[in-house]
Amino acid sequence: MKHLIGLEHLSEEDILSLVDLGLRYRNWLEGENKQSLSILKGKRICLLFYEPSTRTRHSFELASRLLGGEVASFSLAVSSVQKGESFKDTLLTLESMGFDLFVIRHSISGACLYATKVLQRAGVVNAGDGMHEHPSQTLLDILTIKQAKGTIENLKIAIIGDILHSRVARSAIFAFTKLNWEIRLCAPPTLFPKDIEKFGVKIFYKIEEAIRDVDVIYVLRIQRERQKEQFFPSLEEYSRLFSLTDSLLSLAPRAIVMHPGPVNRGVEIEGIVVDGEKSLILEQVKNGVALRMAILHSLLGEE
Amino acid sequence: MMDLLIKGGKVIDPYNKFAKTSDILIKEGEIQAIEKGIEADVPSYDATGKLVLPAFIDLHSHLREPGQEYKEDLTTGALAGVAGGFCALFAMPNTSPPIHSKSQIAYIFRKAENLPLYVFPIGALTLDMKGETLVPIGELAEAGVKALSDDGMPIQNSGLLRNALLYAKMFGLIVMLHCEDKSLSERGVANEGFTATRLGLRGMPKSAEEIGVARAIILSLATGCRVHICHISTKNSLELIRWGKKMGAPITCEVTPHHLVLTEEALEGYDTRAKCNPPLRTEEDRKALIEGLLDGTIDCIATDHAPHSREEWDVEFDLAPFGISGLETAFPLLYTKLVEEGGFPLDLLVEKLTFAPAKIMGLNLGSLKIGEEANLTIIGTEPLKVDVESFHSKGKNNPFDGWTLKGFPLLTICKGKTAYERRNDL
């Protein structure tokens, strides 16, 4: 594997082997040895972020350092051809500096696949492209679920929130479909993309029905701009109809609660749930470093 | 002016309901005879096994001059046209600045005199195509335009559009409408459907086009102004046009070669060369469009030739402009995919590219008439690979690059002269 662009075209076998390697790194992170490794010794990793990011960027950076790689980080704005340097020229320029791998976050869907066509030699990891995919997020989520549940067989997951604009939701649907999970999606109709049911997912408009007896409740962040664009009348109404509250949790006694962050407490999820015993939100963050070590190892490490 | 005897080609002229193997004698640029066994002491062209057709007419080309010569200019656009078998192109007015004065119209007509084919400028409808203020429509009519259009920047205000139609009707002008309710499609880059959902692309719903089509029909009925509906792409647009024609609305419509051949799946891999507006739709729509040609609901085929520079389309998907540089693949694509592979009648395809568009615009072109200037194209039927680098157009944004197609023009005669002859090494 040279690039990691998305989970849609990744085999189940590749997904599981990345998760298993992530699990090994998670154990290593928990262990006594705090010495960095040298798996990426002499490798140069470029973090190229065209959108703000806290956890993804820092976890890739930390993962690179823990594996002994050289890492440089750039935050840029998407510019059209007329204004400033194009994405293509930026990539070619940075590749000339000798980077082996680009970890790219971009506001436009397909930008990471485009980067693979521009670059002559270096690999690409998609750290989130527009509304398309966020593969490392879903991989760390599978790792978290496997850790908590002890299995990834026959699971039921409810994903609640802005499916339309969410790259996390798309990666999740692509991967969970391959794992044969039952996928339930819950949102107002305005926040579903067209023909989503063709993935074989189940559509719900009532959160209490969507989460009943599921193994995992996955809550998506709701952007405040969506209210301004009138996908729903108000944040209050969204919250009243779709927020995961503590009292709802009794409908799914087995369920663990996950969220890709950053959370809007009191909007899509009640604060007490974020901090509650069912919540694995901070576990997800820890696993983020481990899983990203696994990705970098798989793409750049010696066999 | 040329003399030429075209021997043994299959001559198809739907206007005259003629489809036979025949010779054609051209003397001093005029067609002298169409019959078997002509003998004449003039240079001859062996067209055995080839098609001889009236040259095509495109009602919808973006030739980019003035102001965007880095994308295309009148000369390269005209060369692309004759290489595609065309003898007349209607030039859309979204240039820089847009075409809305007598002097700009005169400039294009004057320049077109020395081009190998006919160019008919279309005037804008509103100043800078902003949909706010009407252009001096009377002045443009006097300067010789046959049609007006704001094309890709359709007037959103229905009251203004109604006035534009009423006023344009006074001069007998045709108003060409790109139908799109922008409030539904704004920021969209692909058909709203499964492909856009998978790829995470912002959707342009079919309803955006269909509301625009319905509005165009209703305002055409209300004003009596002739409206030509550009590049329809959905099944329901077609149903609306059927209804409009039944109601007696003075409407015509066109479809593009790419909407007849491709679906939204062509965007796989984020191919910006297949990004167009209206977007490529679904297989159901594509089949309905072919049906619409067969039953006569769709009046003609137009290319929507929209050349762009490589710097513009070799970018991230959302940043790429809409449009396909299509003049040089239009006929081979339709001949191969519709006629050869789909059983579509060849004479109907030729009709939709020749006298059908000529009739809409009232042109005396699109057929082979004895005693009149020769405008025809000779088509080879051997398979060739599309190579955008050999295009005459500056626009290499064409999703059919690398496809093997049949039906490329070998020789195009326009204005009674040889306008194009395909190089043997291509």
Image: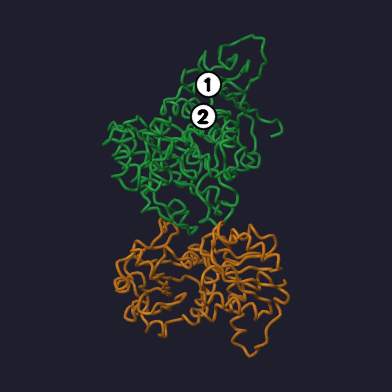
Chain colours: A orange, B green
Crowding around mark 1 (Cα neighbors within 10 Å: few <14, some 14 to 19, many 20+) is many
Q: Is the residue under label 2 in contact with that under label 1 (CB below 8 Å)?
A: no
Examine the rendered structure and indicate whether residue B399 appears above or below residue A172. Answer: above
Q: Is residue A93 left or right of residue A148?
A: right
Q: Is residue B309 left or right of residue A202?
A: right
Instruction: Classify residue A121 by image quadrant.
Output: bottom right
Q: Quadrant of the N terminus of chain B?
A: top right
The chain identifier of the residue carrying mark 1 reads B
Residue reaching furthest left? B222
Q: Considering the numbered disc 2 on the image, is that residue within a helix, a strand or a loop?
A: strand
In front: mark 1 or mark 2?
A: 2
Residue nearer the viewer, B196 or B54: B54
Residue nearer the viewer, B5 or B269: B5
Write down the residue under mark 2: B88
Residue reaching furthest front? B103
Residue nearer the viewer, B216 or B34: B216
Write down the residue under mark 1: B12
Residue reaching furthest bottom? A32
**In the rendered structure, which amino acid carries the disc numbered 1?**
Ile
Examine the rendered structure and indicate whether residue A282 appears above or below residue B161. Answer: below
Image point (53%, 55%), residue name: B317
The alpha-carbon separation of the residues under discs 1 and 2 comes to: 19 Å
The chain identifier of the residue carrying mark 2 reads B
Q: Is residue A300 visible?
A: yes
Image point (43%, 64%), residue name: A165
